[in-house]
Structure formats: structure tokens, C-alpha cells
Amino acid sequence: MNLRVAFQMDHISSLNIAGDTTFALCLEAQKRNHEIFHYTPEQLTYKNGFLSAPIEPFEVYDDTNNHFLLRAPIQSDFSDIDVLLMRQEPPFNMNYITYTHLLEHLSKSTKIINNPTSVRNAPEKLLVTFFKNLMPETIITRDKNEIYNFQEIHNDIVVKPLYGKGGEGIILIKRDDDLNKILTDFLKKEKEPIMIQPFLPEVKYGDKRIIILNGEPVGCLNRIPAEGEFRSNLGVGGIPELLDLSENDKKICLEIKPTLLDMNLFFVGIDVIGDYLTEINVTCPTGVRQIKSLGGPDIPSLFWNQVEESFSNK
């Protein structure tokens, strides 16, 4: 089977390929002789009910000094594209949301991963709130009094922007810190409500990223915070290790599976600290290269196996 696959992504020249999941998906698609095409979201144009973009056939090489070759662009209305992967990185802002609206104009014959309507309705830190029994206690607000009361109960708290990425902007406020000043400064920068949770000491043992394909968990990467850091994201120095899923992890995956399937969220990365589900990542899940390099499953291969099967069953 040879598919025509378009990658809506950050420009390939900007990728750090050593740990980039989009690049890994490109490599595997090329290995299977699928035709792959590159474009950035800014190149999309809507006109009279149709969407188009100058898409570039490209080749990828697993070489940090020379990792891609872009060929002459072809103006495409996507009518002959079998699969479109929406893989641009957040922040999840109005710019991001606009592209999910535009992609809804594509023909149903093009399989979009993940479903743009569902991506729009499932920001990482908001979809998870529908599973409150799996989460740590959480408030989302801009009301300082609510935050003061929350800290009275929980002492050390973690404050998060709702629409960031990679741990950016997340801060730890300890019991003895100047909460009023820190919140005032934080709320000046953030225009939306913010998420507040208790600090989970279990994070010192790691923050798990569990990759889910079509509702089923297929790999788990634990990320241990670097010394002196409470965030575990790899982008801020988290140390990766391979882990098997615990029984609690499996329970979490089973509980969220019907929602993921109903929303047609095919490729998802969830975050688990201790026994708690903290995020459901649907925009641009990462971690698959690290999982494979540590001896875990080849998730890009599993990904394309399932995509190809969905076409063979038509």
C-alpha cells in the first residue's frame, strides 16, 4: 500500500530530530514508500469553500547535519491526499484554533490525525477535567481568593497556564512564598484562567508519558526531574527512562478509552504523576523516539500499521 501523506508541521528545518516524534513518523512513512509532503500551517488558504496549500514533496534522513530535502512545491487542494497529520506544536491559541476550523473543509476522504474538531475541543489541560476522579484536586480560575483558599489547604501548589507547552510557564509556589506578588505577576502575563493543583511530591520519581494509539496504550516513558527542578519535561532537562505500565496506569487508560475513540483522537499522549492523570495531550504528542531508543516498542511502525489497516478495511 502506498499512501499520499501530508504533514502539517513546524518547518522541518526547525526540528531537533534526535527526539522529534513528527520526524520519526516521517522516517517510517518514507521507509514504507508512502509519498510524503511538507507544509506549514501558515501556507493554508481557504477560498470559496475549498482549502489549498503549496505542499512540498520531501525526503528525510536520520542525520543531524543533513536531515531533509524539500522539492518544488505543488499547489494542492488535498483531494488526492490520503492522510493529513496535524503536527504543529502548541501554544494552543487562536492561531492554532483557526487552523482546526480550516481543516474541517477538507473532504472526508482525507483522514486527518487527530480529528481537528476534537483537537479544538480537547486542550491538554481541559479535556482531563472530565475525569476528575483520576486527577489531583484542581481549580481553574483567576480569582485570587479561591487560590489563597486552595493554598491554605494544600500548602505548596503548582500554577500552570492552560495553553502552554513543554512545561513552559509552570511555577511552584511554596507555602512561605509571597503568593500575592507571584500571582499578580503571573496573571498579568496570562489572560486566560489558570490551573492550580497541589504539588505532588511523587513527581521526584517521574512524570510518565503514556502513548496511546486508537485507544490502546503502546508505550510508557518516565521523565525524572533534573536536580533542583520540579518539572520533568524533557525540554527542561528531564531524564528519560523506560517503564512498564502499572495496574493503575492501565486503569486510567481503560477509563479514558471510550472518550478518545468517540472523539476520534487516534494519537494521544497522557501524563501520569504517581496515581494521578494530569494531562491528555492531543495536539502534538511526543516521546516515541526516546521510547524506541531505550529499547521500547517502535511506535511509528505501530502507528503506520494501524493507519494502513484502516485503509485496507475500506
Image (cartoon, rainbow, N blue to C red):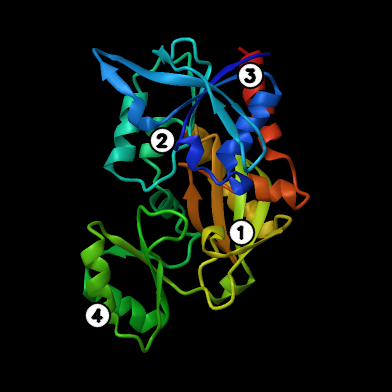
Q: Amino acid at mark 1?
A: Lys
Q: Residue at coordinates 70% horizontally, 32% vertically from top-left? A: 301
Q: Residue at coordinates 55% horizontally, 76% vertically from top-left? A: 201
The answer to whether the residues at label 1 and label 2 have Cβ atoms under 8 Å apart is no
- The residue beneath circle 2 is 118
Q: Quadrant of residue 140?
A: bottom left
Q: Which mark is residue 208?
A: 1
- Dot in front, 1 or 2: 1
Task: Give SS at disc 2.
Answer: helix
- The residue beneath circle 4 is 181
Q: Earlier in the sequence, mark 4 or mark 3?
A: 3
In this image, 159 relative to 265: left or right? left
Q: Amino acid at mark 4?
A: Lys
The furthest residue to the front: 65
Q: Which mark is residue 34?
A: 3
Whether residue 142 is visible = no
Residue 16 vs 87, above or below: the answer is below
- List x then y, in percent, for residue 304: 65, 28
The answer to whether the residues at label 2 and label 4 have Cβ atoms under 8 Å apart is no
Q: Earlier in the sequence, mark 2 or mark 4?
A: 2
The answer to whether the residues at label 4 and label 3 have Cβ atoms under 8 Å apart is no
The answer to whether the residues at label 1 and label 4 have Cβ atoms under 8 Å apart is no
Q: Alpha carbon of mark 1 to alpha carbon of mark 4: how far?
A: 32 Å
